Image (cartoon, rainbow, N blue to C red):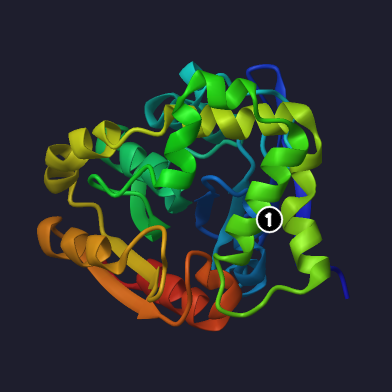
Amino acid sequence: MADPVDRRTVEVDGDELSYLVAGEPDLPPLLLLHGTFWSRVWAPVLPELGRTACCIALDLPGFGASTGELTPEQATVPALAQTVVRAADALGLDSFDVAGHDIGGGIAQHLAATTGRVRKMVLMNAVMFDSWPVPAVERFRDAEVRASTGTADLLKARETSTRGSTIRPLSEEELTDYLSPWHEPARVRSWMAMAAAADSRYTLALVPALKEAAAPTRLVWGRDDDFQKLEYARRYAEEIPNADLVVVEGKHIPTEDSPHEVARAIVEHLGAAS
């Protein structure tokens, strides 16, 4: 039997952006976005999601298996949202559902608030309001810190962060897979560019437009996330119209801790009548 998840590429702004795809092309499109990790965070749920949606889990430039290298100016939430729009254009997606994790959730909010192309949205342990950047990311806003951080340094920091992002201990094989992009200096620089560009003013500025757009939104949240606290998800569900919250067992990457529960919550939301 063929693997239900495949990896492909699409050219955007001269870069080959890699993405994981699951589901038949005639199913409703679901664009899945990452933040300080990469498309690997969505891998545990793609086979299940692919039964009801054509899933495209994109690697941003300089992340995962994509080519390119981000600068801090290219790594802001608004700039990355424009990159995602161009990727959607290249993939032939006029309108789509979107799911965002971590800073990818900030990108998803920007798309929902400003483009008119998002049908439904899922935010999974995502940045919102003034919940970010967390200290481990914020320190890279200092140019001297970035200049003094080598590949081995960031790899060690990413290992610590990844180990702390799940309740279930990742196997050594899984951990190696998660960390694999950050053996390459260009991807290290891209990660630090995203960290340098992390700024809560982008998500705070979106709140009025999110309230007006009222895109049907489900927040799916790992209960014990140390990075993006559950209290922010509760606040979003209370303040933004047409949003609800499903809490699952897990930390910052609940797809690893509760994959079936996460997938079920997403499928239920996308399949519900608007």
Question: Which image quarter is the N terminus in?
Answer: bottom right
- Residue 213 rendering spot, x and y as whole percentages: 18, 44
Q: Name above or below for residue 57 compared with residue 204.
A: below
Residue 79 appears in which quarter of the rendering? Answer: top left
Count of numbered circles in the view: 1
Residue positioned 40% across, 40% down in the render: 107
Residue positioned 64% across, 50% down in the render: 158
- Residue 36 rendering spot, x and y as whole percentages: 55, 45
Residue 145 appears in which quarter of the rendering? Answer: top right
Q: Nearer the viewer, residue 37 or 268?
A: 37
Residue positioned 42% across, 53% down in the render: 97
- Residue 271 rendering spot, x and y as whole percentages: 39, 71
Q: Name above or below for residue 50 compared with residue 190.
A: below
In this orientation, does residue 40 appear?
yes
Question: Which image quarter is the C terminus in?
Answer: bottom left
Q: Report crowding for label 1: few under 14, some 14 to 19, many 20 or more residues within 10 A (C-alpha).
A: some
Residue wearing tag 1: 159
In the image, is 111 to the left or to the right of 94? Answer: left
In the image, is 72 to the left or to the right of 189? Answer: left
Q: Nearer the viewer, residue 55 or 79?
A: 79
Q: Nearer the viewer, residue 267 or 27?
A: 267
Residue positioned 72% across, 31% down in the render: 150
Q: Name above or below for residue 128 compared with residue 60.
A: below
Callout 1 secondary element: helix
In the image, is 158 to the left or to the right of 196? Answer: right
In this orientation, does residue 103 appear?
no
- Residue 221 rendering spot, x and y as whole percentages: 38, 70
- Residue furthest toward the right? 1
In the image, is 110 to the left or to the right of 24? Answer: left
User: Which amino acid, by three-letter code, is at mark 1?
Assistant: Glu
